[in-house]
Image: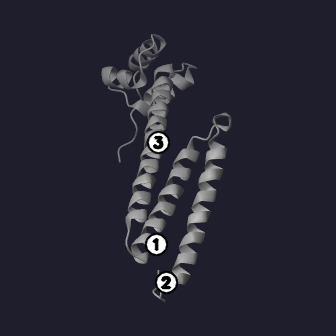
Amino acid sequence: MSPAVPIPEDKRDEVLRLAREGVARNEITRQTGVSTASVTRICADEGVTFDRSATEAAVKARVVDMKATRVGLAGALLDDVQTARARMHASEDNRAFLDGARAIAGLVGAHVRVAGFDKDDSSGVDAARSMLGRLATAIGVAVSEDASETDGEAP
């Protein structure tokens, strides 16, 4: 590994000039050939900071997009619960009914976890979670009772 070569004063001045003009750190690196770490260090030594508002706005937008995706997923999981319920009730044997009940319990649990990720106390999520939790418990009880009534088959 070769020893670090000091950055010439004129290059340091160029880095500082660009930073003070509001040029982004990565763009300064491209224009000057000075590494990003060195650009950061040169600017920090002189008390020059970078405007992070564009990055902050991009992060906020991404967070909003991910929340929208989770809301869509939570809705899709509820649709899956409805589909699984229809199949469960259309089943003609205990085994298929129990399998459907297990699928519903898993889907409800997944929905509760996804919906709870962006919990907002003012939106009624707690009430929905409580209701879905009670539903999952009731399904579990029904599965247990139905399993005990079957002719000894393992669920």
User: Where does label 3 land, which residue?
Assistant: 70
Cβ–Cβ below 8 Å for labels 2 and 1? yes
Where is residue 112? Give x, y as percent: 56, 51
Q: Looking at the picture, how far across and down is residue 24, in whole percent?
A: 42, 20
Is the residue 54 above or below the residue 38 in the image? above
Determine the secondary structure under disc 1.
helix
Q: Residue furthest top?
A: 21
Label 3 crowd bin: few (<14), some (14–19), many (20+), radius 10 Å: some
Name, please, the residue furthest toward the bottom: 152
Q: What residue sits right under mark 2 in the picture?
A: 150
Q: Amino acid at mark 1?
A: Leu
Disc 2 versus disc 3: distance between alpha carbons?
Answer: 39 Å
Residue 40: where, in percent of width, then height? 48, 28
Q: Residue at x 36, y 22 (%)?
A: 27
Residue 2 numbered mark, or none: none
Q: Which type of secondary structure does the marked residue at label 3 adopt?
A: helix
Label 2, label 1: how far apart the Cα atoms are: 10 Å
**Residue at image point 50% right, 23% down:** 52
